[in-house]
Image (spheres, helix red, strand yellow):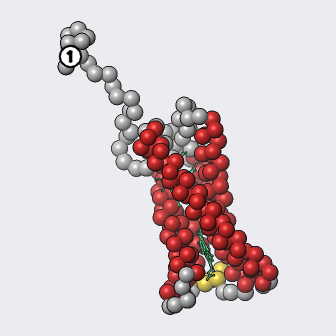
Amino acid sequence: MSRPDRTRFALPLRLIHWTMALLILAMLFIGVGMVSTVGPAYSVLLQLHRPIGAALFVLVLLRLAIRLSTGAPPLPADLPKVQQIVAKGSHLLLYAAMLAMPLIGWAMLSAGGYPIVLTKDLSLPPILPHDLRYYFALRELHTVIALAFFALILAHLGAALMHGLIRKDGVLWSMTFGAARRASVPAPVEHEGPPGLVE
Ligand code: HEM
Ligand code: HEM
């Protein structure tokens, strides 16, 4: 897939990035809400959690395919090497969490012997044999990775705001929509007359 604008992520990647960001944040809160209640809200939240989790799994596979074929805009050349490595490493970890969370959710329900119902007419087949030892280990892992994911997202948000508000280097712009970016260095002011006479 060719991409004319090398300074921005391809449009489908930007659309998927923001759709997934909203859904993942919703999933983290739905998950915490689920384990904090024994009331009727529990089954409502679980009925949302499973299909949104499955949709996120499909979206991340699609996103990876587009990302691998269209690439990413280069980071600013003046960004220190360490920050470039941290940025790339944290993106890899975000992708790993996006892949792992739905898979672990699916595997843990399989091992627990639960039906993996997405909608009234659609259920997923089990991907692990019924074994409670696997269930408990995966249930624990689902929580640990969710917490790490949350922390990583907060750090990612902080970095994006640092780029957008402090460095103003086009990195935040590369993932957003809207008009062309204004140059970060203002154009020199044209003076009439000799220097020093302008107020
Ligand atoms: C990006 C995807 C996902 C995220 C961010 C996510 C997040 C969470 C969180 C934060 C919790 C609460 C953990 C705790 O505090 O112990 C949770 C619990 C849970 N999740 Fe997920 N989850 C995802 C995908 C899935 C999928 C695909 C399934 C199943 C198909 C699933 C099934 C469950 C179940 C069964 C629980 C435990 C409910 C309970 O113990 O009462 N999750 N999830
Ligand atoms: C659940 C939340 C989020 C997840 C999982 C997530 C994930 C990611 C990933 C994996 C990338 C790397 C893209 C690639 O190279 O293919 C990325 C890039 C980016 N994200 Fe997020 N993101 C989230 C939320 C946000 C938020 C809230 C903001 C800003 C306020 C943001 C701003 C950006 C920007 C500016 C980039 C481009 C960074 C660069 O090229 O180094 N993201 N995001």
Q: Amino acid at mark 1?
A: Val
Asked if residue 33 lies left or right of residue 189, the reply is right
Most extreme residue toward the top is 194
- Estimate the x, y position of residue 169 in percent, counting from the top left: 46, 37
Q: Let me know if residue 146 appears in the view.
A: yes
Determine the residue positioned at 53% across, 66% down: 24
- Estimate the x, y position of residue 49 in percent, counting from the top left: 55, 77
- Estimate the x, y position of residue 21 in percent, counting from the top left: 50, 61
When the figure is inspected, residue 62 is found, relative to residue 174, above or below; the finding is below
Q: Let me know if residue 52 appears in the view.
A: no
Residue for badge 1:
198
When the figure is inspected, residue 17 is found, relative to residue 30, above or below; the finding is above
When asked about the image quadrant of residue 80, the answer is top right
Q: Secondary structure at mark 1?
A: loop
Other residues around mark 1 within 10 Å, as few (<14) / some (14–19) / many (≥20): few
150 or 60: nearer the viewer: 150
57 or 192: nearer the viewer: 192
Asked if residue 133 lies left or right of residue 97, the reply is right
Determine the residue positioned at 58% across, 78% down: 50
Ligand 2 is within 8 Å of the C-beta of the residue at disc 1: no
When the figure is inspected, residue 62 is found, relative to residue 165, above or below; the finding is below
Determine the residue positioned at 34% across, 28% down: 186
47 or 160: nearer the viewer: 160
Asked if residue 72 lies left or right of residue 105, the reply is left
When the figure is inspected, residue 113 is found, relative to residue 17, above or below; the finding is below
Which quadrant holds the C terminus? top left
Determine the residue positioned at 68% across, 87% down: 114
- Estimate the x, y position of residue 10 in percent, counting from the top left: 50, 48
Task: Tell how many labels.
Answer: 1
Quadrant holding ligand 1? bottom right
